[in-house]
Image (tube, rainbow, N blue to C red):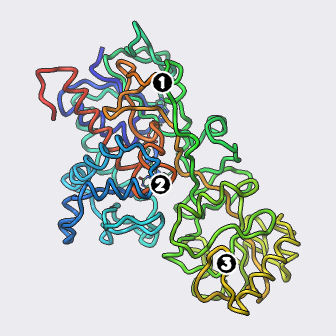
Amino acid sequence: MVDLIVVGAGTAGIPCAIVAAQAGATVAVLEKDSQIGGTLHVSAGHMSGAGSRRQHDVGIDDDTVDRHFDDVMRLSRGEADPVLVRVAVEEAPHTIDWLHDLGFTFDPETPTIYLGHDSYSRARTVWHAAPAGMELIPMGRALGILETLQPLWDEQVAAGRIVPYLATALATLIVENGAVVGVHAEGPLELRAPHTVIATGGYGSSPELFAELTPGRPRLVTNAWHTATGDGIVAARAVGAAIRDGEKHNYRLGMIEIEPGSGRGDMRKDFVNLSAAVRRPDEIWVNLRGERFADETTHDITSQERTLHDQPEQRFWLVFDEAAVEGPQAPLPLLWERDRLRVAADAGVFVWRDATLGGVAAKAGISAAGLERTVAGYNARIACGEADPLGRSGADRPIATGPFYALALPAGVLITFGGIHVDGQLRALDGAGQPIPGLYAAGEVVGGGATSGIAFCGGMLVTPALSFGRILGRALAAAASPARPPA
Ligand SMILES: Cc1cc2nc3c(=O)[nH]c(=O)nc-3n(C[C@H](O)[C@H](O)[C@H](O)COP(=O)(O)OP(=O)(O)OC[C@H]3O[C@@H](n4cnc5c(N)ncnc54)[C@H](O)[C@@H]3O)c2cc1C
């Protein structure tokens, strides 16, 4: 019997186990991978918190937890869970300060207002400094969080307070007298504790669960870590936990499926930055019918993302001409040279080019008649200075200088929005809204919708995962030994 079982040694599970162990609890950690870290191996690791010491250090003294809360509720379109957002934003600056104290190396550009999502009102998003060669890409920085926490993890493992079971997957939760009292895992292994924290991440690598929980059932093209198969959701649901928010799902635009049919993307390299705040687009976005469907120039990124939900097969293409490729704002994947795009377009894998619009449409699988009609109308409006029906603004260039290009973009999955319904103490709730004794959850397993609504609110997955893990580690260590003060 241990004080606490943590299922999943990732973004939420690692701090949960460390904080509980530092407070003197004995913690068994089940991890199905052969290494710890989970999504920290691939995440951008952007974190957001108001009033962090890092903000003060660079002279930002007018940010508050209330302002952060209001921003998240605004950006999430009021769809995030206000109780959990409140808990998350209150803990966020302490979580960032904790990492700061542990020697976390902030990117010198941060805190900043990250422009890849709808913008916060204050510069409160931070991430780790770049590894060599990655300076231009604000992705893949979460490894810095793992590296910062690793010594604490090792220390508690050496002290015997964290007992890790690597390459050991949770199978089922043990319920006795209505309470979760332990787990059965592969091995076979049975562990018992008064408290079990599910921290197994999302379901972005499970086509089956994604299809079940996501309305519209699009084909899954994902950047989720390979272990994000929703195991904790399935196990918790089997003991009566309520699952919510799958319908809030949203997509990250710009991810490329470099190998068509693979179902995989990698935002650290195979990504076109579509944020008009960063790169003024010369291209148009068209759907399978060859029709435009969004204002490519708006800074309202969530609206752009949500518009994709209504497009056939939730796929779209960037269409542009050689003049755009030659221009200063070429729609190139990160770190790509122009010639690499041309070579790829001739190979015709995810990007195609042709002397005519009809030709490139045929190669890409878009309606040729639709595309020709769309581009003719688009060019004619520019020629006579007519307002764009979708609101596109600014000095546009016609798409007129062949060869013409079409670059395919899927509805990319970065995170999943559905998850275990928890209350403000992170207790798993049943269908009647009652806590299931002994069962808690933290991280993406509670659903991205809980802290981000139907949008991507900057840092509102990584920071809550770390924070909720810390909160549970503190609370459950104290509960295991009432005489022991919270760390
Ligand atoms: C490319 C990418 C970029 C992102 N960028 C950002 C960002 O900048 N900011 C932000 O806020 N969010 C971002 N996110 C989302 C964020 O990184 C994740 O939501 C968060 O890291 C998930 O943390 P977690 O602890 O819930 O899951 P994980 O970190 O994935 O940890 C879950 C752990 O549970 C283990 N596990 C799973 N099943 C079992 C089982 N059956 N038994 C035992 N162990 C199991 C896994 O192996 C894993 O180690 C990004 C996500 C991706 C994919």
SS for tag 2? loop
Image marks 3 and 2: residues in contact by CB distance under 8 Å: no
Q: Which residue is drawn at 12% across and 29% down?
A: 485
Q: Which residue is drawn at 87% across and 76% down?
A: 358
SS for tag 3? loop
Residue matched to label 1: 241
The amino acid on which the numbered mark 2 sits, given as a three-letter code, is Arg
The N terminus lies in which quarter of the figure?
Answer: top left
Q: Quadrant location of residue 482?
A: top left
The amino acid on which the numbered mark 1 sits, given as a three-letter code, is Ala
On the question of residue 165 being in view, the answer is: no
Image spot of residue 204 (x, y percent): 57, 43
Image spot of residue 366 (x, y percent): 82, 66
Q: Which residue is drawn at 41% across and 49% down?
A: 461
Judge by depth and name the residue closer to the eye, 180 or 241.
Answer: 241
The amino acid on which the numbered mark 3 sits, given as a three-letter code, is Glu
Q: Quadrant location of residue 122?
A: bottom left
| Figure check: 301 above or below 395 | above
Residue matched to label 3: 283
Q: Residue 77 carries which label?
A: 2
Q: Which mark is residue 441?
A: none
